[in-house]
Each structure stands twice: as C-alpha cells, then as structure tokens.
Amino acid sequence: MTAKKTGLEDQGLDEIEALKAEIENLKSALEDKISAVKDAFDSDAVDTIRDKVEDEWDDLKGRIGDNPIPSALIALGIGFVIGRFIAK
C-alpha cells in the first residue's frame, strides 16, 4: 500500500509542478499583453484625450455661465425625473 501511495503522491506532485509551470506561462503571457496595451496607449494619446475632455468641460461651463436660468431649470428637471424613479 505504501508503494501505491507513493506513486499517487508522485503523480500528484508532478501535476502540481505542471500546474505551476502553466501558471508561470500564463503570467508571462499576461505581462506581455499588458505591456503591448501600454505601448498602444502611449502618453500622447492620453494627453490628446485629456485635452479634449478639458476643452469640452470648459465649453460646458461657458454655456452654463452664459445661460444660468435655463441651465438651472434643466438641472431641476433632471433632478425631478431622477427623484421620481428613486421614489418608485
């Protein structure tokens, strides 16, 4: 019975080692993919997106400042609709 148990233990250890190796391979592949994604989204693209968002935000603030009463009424209407959904 000891020989059979040792054989099963060896088989189990072999499977564990194979799984460890597979995990290391997957980890390496994942790190390669992450690196590729980082390279694809270089800092110039991020800066371009950030600038576009800032420009749109400034435009929105300007529109609100130019039209404060309609902006307040729109915000009130949106708040009322959201309130109605939440109350149900």
Image (cartoon, rainbow, N blue to C red):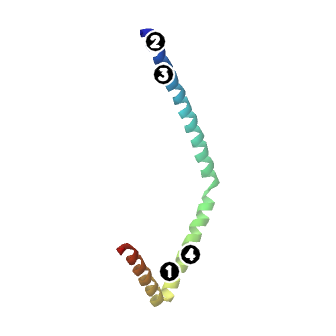
Q: Secondary structure at mark 3?
A: helix
> Going from the N terminus, do you reach mark 3 or mark 4 first?
3
The label number, if any, that marks residue 18 in the structure image:
none
Report the Cα–Cα distance between label 4 and label 1: 9 Å
> Which residue, given by chain and number where applicable, does mark 1 sit on?
61
The dot on residue 56 is 4
Q: Nearer the viewer, mark 2 or mark 4?
A: 2
Whether tag 2 and tag 4 are in contact, CB under 8 A, the answer is: no
Q: Secondary structure at mark 4?
A: helix
Residue with the mark numbered 2: 4
- The answer to whether marks 3 and 2 mark residues whose Cβ atoms lie closer than 8 Å is no
From the image, state whether disc 1 or disc 3 is nearer to you: 3
* Disc 2 from disc 4: Cα separation: 72 Å
Q: Residue at x 46, y 84 (%)?
A: 74
* Above or below 59: residue 18: above
Amino acid at pointer 2: Lys
Q: Nearer the viewer, mark 3 or mark 2?
A: 2
